[in-house]
């Protein structure tokens, strides 16, 4: 089915000048970028985004990493976009990420792992609306 998913290029990948290389992988995979904005997250915005992890031991480090520099938040659209995006990102821990995936090539640790992607249709809907209003997501007419 045609789907939308939320992508975040995290502060480590932005700082490493890897935005273009990561966008290239999205586009080469057939995913279309239908919304994008660079943002400096604060504790409230990053903490709210990751609220489901609030009780996990890594939560404070996660929020402080996600606020350490700008992120590029995007909506990607395409056939099977949620699973496709997860496939090209690779495993959460770059040590486990398959060769040729974004995390294998650009991430340094499970904490600084270059990208985030929605893990289900429900989280995609929630995550997209957390960052974008409807007018900011552009339908592709060509
Ligand atoms: P992300 O997909 O953005 O969702 C939550 C993030 O928490 C995850 O990527 C990792 O970068 C980070 N994290 C740190 N430790 C863990 C862990 N043990 N399990 C899952 N995620 C972790």
Image: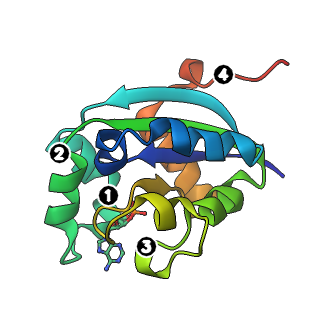
Dot 4 alpha-carbon crowd within 10 angstroms: few under 14, some 14 to 19, many 20 or more = few
Identify the disc placed on residue 94: 3
Residue 136, percent across and down? 54, 21
- Which residue is labeled 1 in the image? 50
Mark sitting earlier along the chain (3/4): 3
Q: Residue at x 59, y 75 (%)?
A: 98
Quadrant for residue 42, please give it.
Answer: top left
> Does the beta carbon at disc 1 come under 8 Å from ligand 1?
yes
- Which residue is labeled 2 in the image? 68
Quadrant for residue 72, please give it.
Answer: top left
Q: Secondary structure at mark 2?
A: loop
How far is disc 1 from disc 4 in space, using C-alphas? 25 Å
Mark sitting earlier along the chain (2/4): 2
- Which residue is labeled 4 in the image? 138
Total marks in image: 4
Q: Does the image show residue 31? A: no
Q: Nearer the viewer, residue 107 or 120?
A: 107
Callout in the foreground (2, 4)? 2
In the displayed structure, would residue 116 be above or below residue 60? above
Mark sitting earlier along the chain (1/4): 1
Residue 73, percent across and down? 44, 37
């Amino acid at each position: 089915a045609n789907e939308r998913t939320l992508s975040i290029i995290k502060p480590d990948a932005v700082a490493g000048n890897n935005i273009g290389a990561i966008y290239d992988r999205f586009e080469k995979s057939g995913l279309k970028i239908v919304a994008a904005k660079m943002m400096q997250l604060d504790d409230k915005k990053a903490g709210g985004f990751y609220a489901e992890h609030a009780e996990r031991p890594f939560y404070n480090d996660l929020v402080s990493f996600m606020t350490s520099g700008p992120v590029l938040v995007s909506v990607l659209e395409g056939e099977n976009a949620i699973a496709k995006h997860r496939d090209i990102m690779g495993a959460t821990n770059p040590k486990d990420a398959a060769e040729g995936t974004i995390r294998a090539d650009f991430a340094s640790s499970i904490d600084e792992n270059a990208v985030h992607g929605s893990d289900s249709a429900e989280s995609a809907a929630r995550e997209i609306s957390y960052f974008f209003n409807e007018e900011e997501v552009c339908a592709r007419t060509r």
